[in-house]
């Protein structure tokens, strides 16, 4: 049998940090875009070695072992590492035969009693053909404790017949829309070959949440969003979720068309990340489904950390559009669901969101129309890594929504620092995405004071 080429072309990743461990990920793919064999791999299991060390030179290896890369899961590897020290940096790598993977840096969550500050970034909406992932390279350079990805890791679209300016900067692996397992796998491979995306995965553990484009634009619940067959869509969703798992450092495998996305990740006494799925359980006027809503309310009301960070994909606060109806693909389309969540809002509630390809920031209120209404928390909305923004009259929307305090159309990410005394969010924007090498600047910074936004003068 011919010797395999270099198998770690898609890089390495870690995720789902706990105080004593993480998930380590890689996928064997010597030919990432092979047309018939996923990754160009033979149809047999392969044994991959892994190591975790306290130093980047691997002179102090603390754990090692072997994992099986199975062809049915595209030779992806998900290693559950436990028994590590809390709140500590580690380095990891994989080997197969004489091939050695890139080295990744990961970090465990802090212990329950920890009051050490928590540094995290959040991103969303990284459409490959719309530009370069330079923002992810800058985020990697910050070496945060953890990175949250809030959806649209890939876009399922094919090449448009008449792409507008800036909408087809980099070619995809196929001009067809993804609908099959093989197509989704190759779309992830195309993205994960990107050096900037690999750098962001190798710099810190991720907590990732899919939104709609990992499957299909604007899908909700069991409905595809275009009026086509729900039964056929669920088969497509099963393929999409399987490919998502194969390419992300997740703890839980999908089961058919279902994937357990909502979960809780504590970070000592400083922060609790409560991850909610605002896509998979929608039904009628219900955003979360009864079971997830009960879980979310219990998590928020029972939280003991200083900051309760609700991480989810879509715009949470009310956003009135002059002369336009509210968005039905955001929480404005589910006002009763939102009101029930806010009725249980704990002190220190911070909602982080993505989806809309622009920066926003605002206060959460019991009564959106009353400026004197009780402040219940804040929302930080991140922009896209690359995805083109919609035409938005930000000034008019801010004027119509006094609880919203900020709008900006740069591409980039949000870098946050939480401590027992403060919560700060820095909106970091790149100058351009149509070519590599854009510098990054801080567009705006905010702190949270008494459950309200306070802008910091730069």
Image: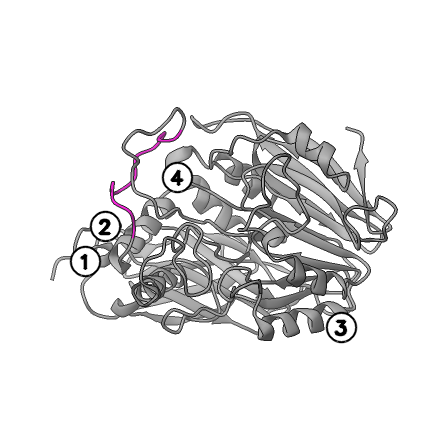
For the residues bearing labels 2 and 1, Cβ distance under 8 angstroms: yes
Q: Nearer the viewer, mark 4 or mark 2?
A: 4
Residue 423 image point, x, y percent: 77, 49
Q: Earlier in the sequence, mark 2 or mark 1?
A: 2
Query: What type of secondary structure mainly makes up the magenta span?
Result: loop
For the residues bearing labels 4 and 2, Cβ distance under 8 angstroms: no
Q: Quadrant of residue 7?
A: bottom left
Q: Earlier in the sequence, mark 2 or mark 3?
A: 2
Local crowd size for mark 4, using a 10 Å CA cut-off: few (<14), some (14–19), many (≥20): many
Residue 127 image point, x, y percent: 42, 40
435 left or right, relative to 312: left
| Residue with the mark numbered 1 | 37
Q: Is residue 121 above or below residue 232?
A: above
| Residue with the mark numbered 4 | 128
Q: Nearer the viewer, residue 100 or 76?
A: 76
Q: Is residue 312 above or below residue 427?
A: below
For the residues bearing labels 1 and 3, Cβ distance under 8 angstroms: no
Queried whether the magenta region covers residue 176, the answer comes back as yes
Residue 101 image point, x, y percent: 37, 54
Q: Nearer the viewer, mark 2 or mark 1?
A: 1
Disc marking residue 302: 3
């Amino acid at each position: 049998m011919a010797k395999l080429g270099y198998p770690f072309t898609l890089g390495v990743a870690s995720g789902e940090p706990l105080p004593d461990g993480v998930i380590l990920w890689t996928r064997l793919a010597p030919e990432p875009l092979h047309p018939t064999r996923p990754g160009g791999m033979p149809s047999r299991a392969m044994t991959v070695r892994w190591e975790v060390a306290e130093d980047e030179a691997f002179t102090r290896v603390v754990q090692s072992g072997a994992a099986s890369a199975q062809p049915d899961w595209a030779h992806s590897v998900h290693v559950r590492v436990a028994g590590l020290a809390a709140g500590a940096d580690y380095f990891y790598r994989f080997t197969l035969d004489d091939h050695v993977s890139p080295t990744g840096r990961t970090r465990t969550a802090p212990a329950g009693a920890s009051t050490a500050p928590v540094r995290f970034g959040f991103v969303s909406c990284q459409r490959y053909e719309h530009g370069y992932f330079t923002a992810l390279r800058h985020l990697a350079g910050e070496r945060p404790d953890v990175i949250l990805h809030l959806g649209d890791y890939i876009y399922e679209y094919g090449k448009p017949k008449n792409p507008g300016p800036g909408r087809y900067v980099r070619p995809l692996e196929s001009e067809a829309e993804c609908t099959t397992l093989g197509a989704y796998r190759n779309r992830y491979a195309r993205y994960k070959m990107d050096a900037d995306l690999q750098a962001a995965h190798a710099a810190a553990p991720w907590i990732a949440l899919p939104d709609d484009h990992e499957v299909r634009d604007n899908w909700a619940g069991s409905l595809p969003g275009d009026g086509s067959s729900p039964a056929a869509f669920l088969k497509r969703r099963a393929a999409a979720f399987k490919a998502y798992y194969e390419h992300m450092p997740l703890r839980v495998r999908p089961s058919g068309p279902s994937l357990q996305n909502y979960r809780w990740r504590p970070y000592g006494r400083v922060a609790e990340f409560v991850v909610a799925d605002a896509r998979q359980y929608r039904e009628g006027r219900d955003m979360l489904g009864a079971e997830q809503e009960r879980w979310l309310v219990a998590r928020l009301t029972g939280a003991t950390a200083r900051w309760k960070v609700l991480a989810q994909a879509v715009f949470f606060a009310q956003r009135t559009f002059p002369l336009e109806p509210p968005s039905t693909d955001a929480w404005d389309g589910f006002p009763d669901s939102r009101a029930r969540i806010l009725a249980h809002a704990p002190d220190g509630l911070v909602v982080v969101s993505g989806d809309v390809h622009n920066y926003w920031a605002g206060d959460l209120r019991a009564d959106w129309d009353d400026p004197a209404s009780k402040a219940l928390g804040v929302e930080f909305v991140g922009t896209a890594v690359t995805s083109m923004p919609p035409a938005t009259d930000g000034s008019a929307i801010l004027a119509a929504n006094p609880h919203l305090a900020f709008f900006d159309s740069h591409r980039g990410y949000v870098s946050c620092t939480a401590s027992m005394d403060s919560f700060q969010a820095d909106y970091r924007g790149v100058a351009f995405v149509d070519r590599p090498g854009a510098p990054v600047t801080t567009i705006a910074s905010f702190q949270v004071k008494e459950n309200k936004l306070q802008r910091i003068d730069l």
